[in-house]
Image: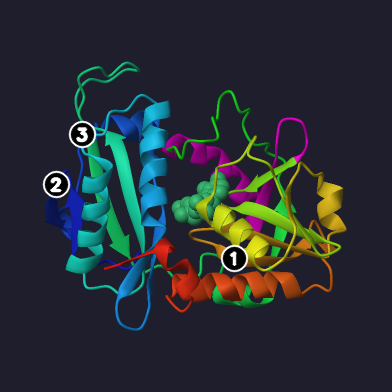
Amino acid sequence: MIKKTEKIWMDGKFVDWDKANVHVMTHTLHYGLGVFEGIRCYETGNSPAIFRLKEHVERLFKSAHIFMLKIPYSQKEIENAIVQTVKINKIKECYIRPIVYIGYGAMGLYPKENPVNVAVSAWPWGAYLGEEGLKKGIRVKVSSFIRNHVNSQMSRGKVCGYYINSQLAKREAISCGYDEALLLDTEGYVSEGSGENVFIVRNNRLKTTPLTSILEGITRDSIMEIARDNGIEVIEERFTRDELYIADEAFFTGTAAEVTPIREVDGRTIGAGKPGEITRKLQSVFFDIAKGRNKKYKSWITRV
Ligand code: PPE
């Protein structure tokens, strides 16, 4: 169950958590067109800090632009709403979920007059794939469901309806005894997890899927920059599932998943079956930055 906090920002006002309701005829609930973000805030010792706030809000607006949703606020106003939501709830570490949705009005697929509503909630959310997964690695299944074609699931957007495909994949993986699903693209190359980007390490080189059929992950971007700064070569290149099977190391990245090592894929052990050296290094630098312990990347965090 979600851990409740006190207030949720809805269209410019703070509302009690239990009263933050929408009408059952809310358009997005029926048709799935809404855009959202997932952002994390970490305790830094003297204040909570939001990780890459500006980039997340920018992506929210880009998602809305692709789907022709007009957000009735500026990016600055949404950034501010997010900071205030963390502040008012007095939480130190949390996950933040801004959502832009088509509200109550007409039904049907062309809701010209319906309002575009915005809400921001924040609540404590621990390790997405479990504490143990974060430490020891998880078991992944290549899904029988493919990631939707890029001309339907346009990958620069983070859109509510996209996640029905992710849920099919996730349910299948779990019903088969795995922790998470990995989807292939329409041409059979590795694309992304149900809610994560994927990386492999082979011969000390880091490889990740290019931005053709995946969400432009902000954690992915952060990890690539951290790797390069640490002298690790990074390439963005398509790869197949068997290259993943023979990788020395593999891991998922995402706001919720953070940096989660992968120790097994489709019954094949990855590397030594435990988090590899490069994965552990990148994971540790990532948490140091997010938790305000690495001054070099202080522009990535917004103190609350
Ligand atoms: N791919 C997908 C499909 C995806 O949903 C996410 C984030 C990523 C890649 C990584 O993106 P980024 O967070 O910017 O590094 N998934 C979000 C939703 C998770 C959920 O279950 O809800 C997240 O991690 O917040």
Q: Residues within 10 Å of mark 1 (few under 14, many from 20)?
A: many
Badge 3 or badge 2: first in the primary sequence: 2
Quarter holding residue 39: bottom left
Q: Nearer the viewer, residue 236 or 137?
A: 236
Q: Give the side of residue 136 with respect to residue 195, left or right.
A: right
Quote the CA–CA distance across marks 1 and 2. 33 Å
Q: Answer left or right for 294 relative to 138.
A: left
Q: Position of residue 159 (x, y in %)?
A: 44, 37
Q: Is residue 186 magenta?
A: yes
Name the residue at 22% across, 54% down.
Answer: 80
**Residue drawn at 68 percent across, 38 percent down:** 145
Which label was assigned to residue 72? 3
Spatial CA distance of label 3 from label 2 is 10 Å
Query: Is 93 left or right of 13, judged from the image as shown?
Result: right
Which of the 4 image quadrants contains residue 84? bottom left
Marking on residue 12: 2
Whether residue 264 is in magenta: the answer is no
How many marks do you count on the picture?
3
Compared to 119, does 272 lie above or below? below
What colouring does the structure picture have? rainbow
Disc 3 is placed on an element classified as: loop
Q: Which residues are magenta?
A: 160-189
Determine whether the residue tagged by mark 1 lies in a helix, strand or loop.
strand
Q: Is residue 179 visible?
A: no
Using the rendered image of the protein, determine whether residue 19 is visible from the camera's viewpoint.
Answer: yes
Quadrant the C terminus occupies: bottom left
| Residue that label 1 marks | 259
